[in-house]
Image (spheres, rainbow, N blue to C red):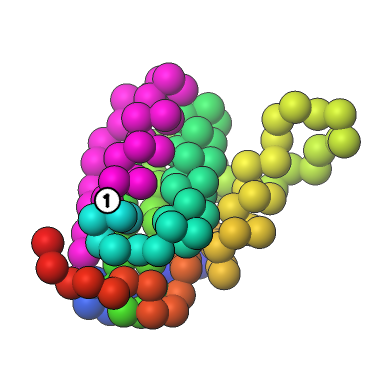
Amino acid sequence: MSPTPLLTQPQHRFETLIAPELAKVSDVRRSAWAVLRRWDVDEPLAGDVQTVVSELVANAIEHGSGWVALRLAGSMGGITVEVSDASPVPARIRSSQPDDSRGRGLVIVAALAQSWGVSDNGFTTWAAFPGRQIRDYGD
């Protein structure tokens, strides 16, 4: 499944490669926040997108393989987050017990994004935040 075609012509793009180290997740969170605020995304939505970026990147580092690619695309149609790694094993929601300290990342993604999914080849997990989210098109 591919992302909802919200962003046929994104006005903004951000892409980066991340070393497969969990310690890098905090750097990615800060970078995503800075990019989203530069795009003039309001703080509540920027916080939700930042959380989804963090969860998807951490999931790719922990359960995927190799370097991780993060792509953000934004336009008046919304924001799309894509995270890819070298593993064709698709991300999936796991069942967790109330006392588990881990295993809820994709549940959080599903709660914050309007939609999410995995590419047909399994390499990319995406989340979509549609709507008129981007107010300022200046770089």
Q: Position of residue 16 (x, y in %)?
A: 24, 41
In the rendered image, the vertical position of residue 127 relative to residue 5, given as above or below? above
Viewer-proximal residue among 88 and 33:
33
Q: Position of residue 93 (x, y in %)?
A: 69, 48
SS at mark 1 in the image: helix
**In this rendering, would 79 be left or right of 35?**
right
In the rendered image, the vertical position of residue 18 relative to residue 137, given as above or below? above
In terms of image quadrants, where is residue 25?
A: top left
Q: Can you see residue 122?
A: no
Q: Position of residue 91 (x, y in %)?
A: 57, 46
Question: Label 1: which residue?
Answer: 35
Viewer-proximal residue among 132 and 18:
132
In terms of image quadrants, where is residue 112?
A: bottom right
Q: Can you see residue 26?
A: yes
Q: Which residues are magenta?
A: 11-35
At x 48%, y 40%, the residue is 54
Mark 1 neighbour density, 10 Å: few (under 14) some (14–19) many (20 or more): some
Q: Position of residue 58 (x, y in %)?
A: 50, 33
Amino acid under label 1? Answer: Val
**In this rendering, would 131 be left or right of 93?**
left
Residue farthest toward the front in the current orientation of the protein: 43
Quarter of the picture containing the C terminus is bottom left
